[in-house]
Image (cartoon, helix red, strand yellow):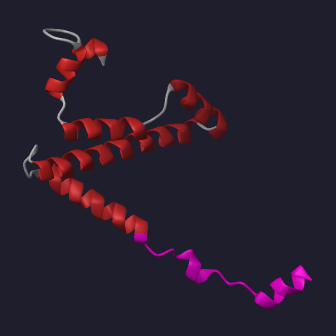
Amino acid sequence: MGILYSAGEGTVYANMAATFTVVSGYAFLAFNLLCAPCFAAMGAIKREMNNTKWFWIAIGYQCGYAYLVGLVINQIAGLITGDTAFNVFTVIAILIIAGFIYLLFRPYKESKTLKVDSKKLLNATK
């Protein structure tokens, strides 16, 4: 960040403050907290998964999820504070929130299909 914002007049922090709003700063922080970790952690993920395909899926999922959360924060909070206007990305952010809520409260299908024979279970514990 220092290299990107040190060019021109002023300090790094003054240049960053001129570029970021409070809302975009929070969205940026959320993105960095949720995106793919450092290369050492990515190496550990690859070693533990022992499969290159699933490693890239995991990294892509982390980056994609971080981008969606950053988009939602930037659009919704920006709409509330007046930093951004209502646009296509706000509609996408609302759809993402609806999807998150659905995934949070969706019924667990396997819970209705699980059959436990309590008599057999009691006999097994004796």
In front of the other: 14 or 102: 14
Q: Residue at x 56, y 83 (%)?
A: 112
Residue 99 in magenta? no
Left or right, 64 with respect to 25, comes to: right
Q: Position of residue 120 (x, y in %)?
A: 83, 86
Look at the image and give the residue range highlighted in magenta. Answer: 105-126
Left or right, 26 with respect to 35, comes to: left
Identify the image quadrant of the N terminus: top left
Vertical arrangement, residue 38 with respect to residue 35, above or below: above
Q: Residue furthest bottom?
A: 119
Q: Quadrant of residue 114?
A: bottom right
Q: Position of residue 121 (x, y in %)?
A: 81, 83
Identify the image quadrant of the C terminus: bottom right
Q: Position of residue 54 (x, y in %)?
A: 55, 42
Q: Residue at x 57, y 75 (%)?
A: 110
Q: Number of callouts in the render? A: 0
